[in-house]
Structures are given as C-alpha cells and as structure tokens.
Image (cartoon, rainbow, N blue to C red):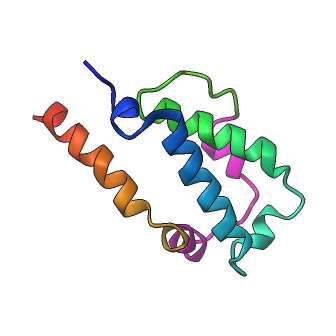
Amino acid sequence: MSTLYDNIGGQPAIEQVVDELHKRIAADSLLNPIFAGTDMAKQRNHLVAFLAQIFEGPKQYGGRPMDKTHAGMNLQQPHFDAIGQVISVKQWLCVACQQMTPKLH
C-alpha cells in the first residue's frame, strides 16, 4: 500500500512546494523580515524533511520541535495568515486530504 507521501508525489513534490514557498516569502514584505539572517538552504532542508515526515515519508527531520523553533519570534496571526496566502497550499493539501479520508473512517 502506498503512503500519503507517495500519493502526493514524494520528495520532488515536497521540494517543489518548499521552493515555491521560499520564493513567495522572499517577495512578501511581512514575511521576508522574519527570515533575515536565516540560512535558507538549511531552512529548506529542515522544512522538506519535516513535511516528508508528516506525510508518512522518511523519518529524517532532525530539527527542533516547532514550539522551540518559533519561540521568541513574536509571530502573530497576520504572519500565519500571510503564509497561507503566499502559496496555494490548498491545492497541494487537497491531495493529502483525499488520501487521508479513507483512513479516518
């Protein structure tokens, strides 16, 4: 049986989504400052590994827990809203949701 990770396109699909997310973050005036001074190559690798693990892929995420990663960043609801707007996550996650539905019943 294939995993959710396989069904959404595996590593290449996740890398594509993360790369597009980073491009849009760079162009967003609210989000870009949050990443000032961040090693974006390292952040990319962490995010790809994190998402792969969430979607039943390889368990390779070695970063800190999300609450510790984001502690002290003073993130507010507008930041989370902006992330949701900068990338068309709905379409990508729709595939994931369709795959998960049978598991929920």
Q: How many marks?
A: 0
Side (left or right) of 2 relative to 54: left
Residue 55: name its quadrant: top left
**Relative height, residue 48 to residue 23 (above, below):** above
- Identified at 69% across, 34% down, the residue is 64
Q: Position of residue 99 (x, y in %)?
A: 24, 39
**Relative height, residue 92 to residue 77 (above, below):** above
- Identified at 70% across, 45% down, the residue is 44
Residue toward you, 57 or 35 = 57
**Relative height, residue 100 to residue 19 (above, below):** above
Instruction: Specify whether residue 2 is in view.
Output: yes
Residue toward you, 68 or 47 = 47
Task: Residue at the far bottom: name it.
Answer: 29
**Relative height, residue 32 to residue 92 (above, below):** below
Give the quadrant of the N terminus.
top left
Side (left or right) of 84 relative to 62: left
Q: Position of residue 26 (x, y in %)?
A: 74, 70
Type of secondary structure dominating the magenta stretch: helix
Residue toward you, 50 or 20 = 20
Magenta stretch bounds: 64-83
